[in-house]
Image (spheres, grey):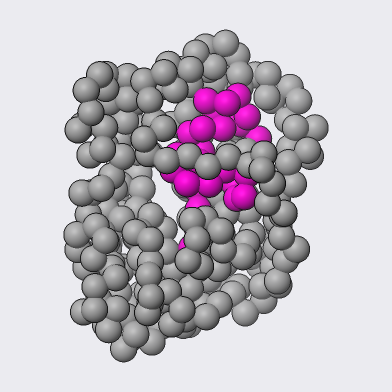
Amino acid sequence: MKRVVILTGSELRHTFFRKAIALSDQIEIVQTYCEGLEKSLGTFVKQESGNDLRTKHLHAREQSELDFFGLFLDSTADRSKPLFLPKGEINSPKYVEAILKSDPDLLIAYGCSIVREPLLSAFPRRFLNVHLGLSPYYRGSGTNYWPLVNREPEYVGATFMHIDSGVDSGEVIHQVRARIAPGDSAVQIGNRLILDMTQVYLNLILRFDQLKAMPQIPSSPAHRYYKKKDYSEESVATLYQNFCDGMIDEYLRDQKSRCAAVSIVENPALVRPIP
């Protein structure tokens, strides 16, 4: 039995994640700390003018999350012991003290604020994070959005890592690439990846003691870093035009060679199936 503390957000994808992880009878959730939406991308976009395309895209994403996760969320008991707090408050002394006092086997993060000292280094190699994107190729904000804007679906995926003080820069444990099917939209690709990521994270927790330290992908000046302010009306227009222009069919025709050219970290403990 693994005793786990979860640090996450409050959007539907985060709620799905914590409730799904908590269903395992081999995991005891000590507490889930759920940060609010005060600094979300949607909040950021609402403060800007000329935001029609970005707003429509975010609404489509919200509706797709409801379609993917709504029935599960409505019909599944919540064993994750959620505690809701404002965005950024995970670093406040009262929450840090509570986490340290609970002394979990693992601290796992998905979609929380940047974690700072003293919490950052309190659980060496027992504090894990998932980055929705393939590090170090894409780092920062929207790291599965920008590969689709740049016509590079082979870079859409998830990275599991030991957390550190950088942005998506911790030691990589394992990576998965998004499953993409003919006719997919950007939000379908993203939500299917969240489903897959959650299952892999669950397996990572259960097999934590079997994980191996893996060779890392070297950083390169060619790798990309994006911020929230880069999310523009023009980028959304490009995204949708790429899908209209057959980007997905083009990718699927050459998927094997394109993925072979973009190496990812695959931990042997997580590649083999659970018995």
Residue 25 point in image, percent of width and height: 43, 74
Q: Is 259 placed above or below 274 here? A: above
Residue 148 location, quadrant: top right
Q: Is 216 placed above or below 38 here? A: below
Residue 69 point in image, percent of width and height: 35, 44
Residue 52 point in image, percent of width and height: 26, 19
Magenta highlight range: 129-154
Residue found at x 71% / y 54%: 217
Query: Horizontally, is 178 left or right of 142 in the view?
Result: right
Residue found at x 62% / y 79%: 209
Residue found at x 41% / y 18%: 234
Single out the residue that lies furthest toward the top: 245
Do we see residue 254 in this rendering? yes
Residue found at x 24% / y 78%: 93
Residue 235 on the magenta segment: no
Q: Nearer the viewer, residue 251 or 183?
A: 251
